[in-house]
Image: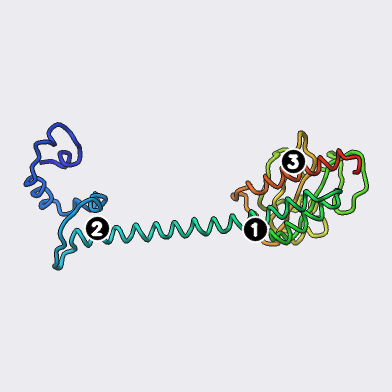
Amino acid sequence: MTQQAIDTPDTTAETITAAQVAEYLAGHPEFFDAHAWLLEKLYVPHQRGTAVSLVERQTSLLRERNQKLHGHLSELIEIARHNDVQFDKTKRMVLSLLEAQTLDDVAIAVEESLCQDFYGDDARLILFSDTPFDVNSLRILSRADCSLVQPLIETSLPSCGQLSEAMNRFLFQENAARIQSAAVVPLVKGETLGLLAIGSFDPDYFQSSQGTLFLSYVGEVLSRIVMHILESPRR
């Protein structure tokens, strides 16, 4: 009898007897090494002796599976806890932004949330306008003045990682030398309204490989609030 006759179901499989199966397994004691999943489905009486019985092997496999499932469950619980904390922080930030009446209020809410709740070391808000107006907590620049960071603007998506020294200076000004990694979020509502830059003294805090779902959400909320204030007569 060949290996194929055991592994591959076909019309001849119906003629295989229990004796032939037993004979094959006796001649191929390594069979279950390559077909360990079968051990979870077999039922055999417990056998004592120096050799490991199928019952003991089954128990070992089930124990290993249980440990893996337990580890996976622990990871899911930890992720759920982390997401709950992130949700609470994000909710507080959004509520603060919704209460903002002026662009200065927006800039203060952003800085307090990102630098306190989310452990950023610096947060800067830059808006684009060819018409200057009076604000204290953020910068108003024309698009022409922002050519240095044009690649960050054109993506319309958050960018994370280590920026060039020139970009750091442009975005974080007097704090640029201390910023080792950053996230830059374009504020887009029909057109690009500005940039949100979050800096960290830790070179690994923002990485190019990290997800940007949270940053995109913050950018969308911030864009709508900024647009609402810009369009308001109370600007």
Task: Say above or below: 94 vs 202.
Answer: above
Labels 1 and 3: the sequence-earlier one: 3
Closer to us: mark 2 or mark 1? 2
Measured Cα–Cα span from mark 3 to mark 2 = 59 Å
The percent position of residue 93, horizontal first and vertical second, equals 73, 53
Labels 3 and 2: the sequence-earlier one: 2
Q: Which residue is mark 1?
A: 205
Task: Say above or below: 154 vs 102.
Answer: above
- Verify CB contact (< 8 Å) between mark 2 and mark 1: no
Q: Which residue is mark 3?
A: 153
Q: Which residue is mark 2?
A: 58
Near-viewer residue (170 or 232): 232
Q: How many marks?
A: 3
The percent position of residue 51, horizontal first and vertical second, equals 16, 64
Near-viewer residue (219 or 192): 219
Mark 3 nearby-residue class (10 Å; few <14, some 14–19, many ≥20): many
| Residue 147 is at least partly visible in this image | no
Q: Which quadrant: the N terminus?
A: top left
Q: Is residue 53 left or right of residue 234?
A: left
Measured Cα–Cα span from mark 1 to mark 3 = 22 Å
Measured Cα–Cα span from mark 2 to mark 1 = 45 Å
| Mark 1 secondary-structure assignment | loop
Residue type at mark 1: give it: Tyr
Mark 1 nearby-residue class (10 Å; few <14, some 14–19, many ≥20): some
| Mark 3 secondary-structure assignment | helix
